[in-house]
Image (cartoon, helix red, strand yellow):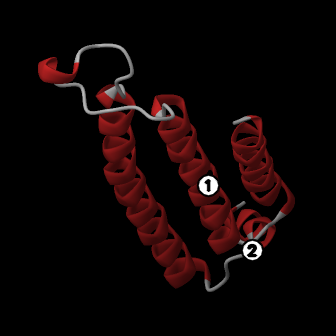
Amino acid sequence: METTYLAVGILICLGIYTVISTKNLIKMVIGISIVESALILLLIFVGYRPQGTVPILDHGYDLVVDPVPQALALTAIVIGASTTALMLALVVKLYKRYDTLDVSKIRKLRG
């Protein structure tokens, strides 16, 4: 169980490092998507219970899986897809206007 949280932590750090270290806008969008995916994995791992059953009254309440993290993960997937689409649309607009994806060159051309 601890290795799953370690994997999530590594993915979050990898995504943040990608966003901070690169100047390419597409790579920044990929880094943000990695962080979003890691957070979805975290939600799934939080809701997981070994030998857990469906939360129905017939089974009792001893070892049931909490459905709230699963619902939040589905919501996060939809929100992540739409934010990624919005970021990519902005990247396309910036590329059409400035003819580059480098952030430092866009700042020089703009300023």
With 108 as the anchor, is 101 left or right in this view? left
Dot 1: what SS?
helix
* Residue sticking out furthest to the left: 58
Q: Marks 1/2: CA distance?
A: 17 Å
Please tell me which residue lies in front, 63 or 83.
63
Q: Is residue 3 above or below residue 47?
A: below
**Mark drawn on residue 102:** 2
**Earlier residue among tags 1 and 2:** 1
Image quadrant holding the N terminus, namely top right
Q: Residues within 10 Å of mark 1 (few under 14, many from 20)?
A: many
Residue behind mark 1: 32
Q: Is residue 12 above or below residue 61?
A: below
Q: Position of residue 105 (x, y in %)?
A: 78, 72
Q: Residue at x 40, y 32 (%)?
A: 52
With 23 as the anchor, is 49 left or right in this view? left
Image quadrant in which you'd find residue 18: bottom right
Please tell me which residue lies in front, 53 or 85.
53
Amino acid on which disc 2 is placed: Asp
Please tell me which residue lies in front, 108 or 28.
28
Q: Position of residue 51 (x, y in %)?
A: 45, 35
Q: Residue at x 39, y 42 (%)?
A: 73
Dot 2: what SS?
loop
Amino acid on which disc 1 is placed: Ile
Please tell me which residue lies in front, 51 or 74.
51
Q: Position of residue 7 (x, y in %)?
A: 74, 48
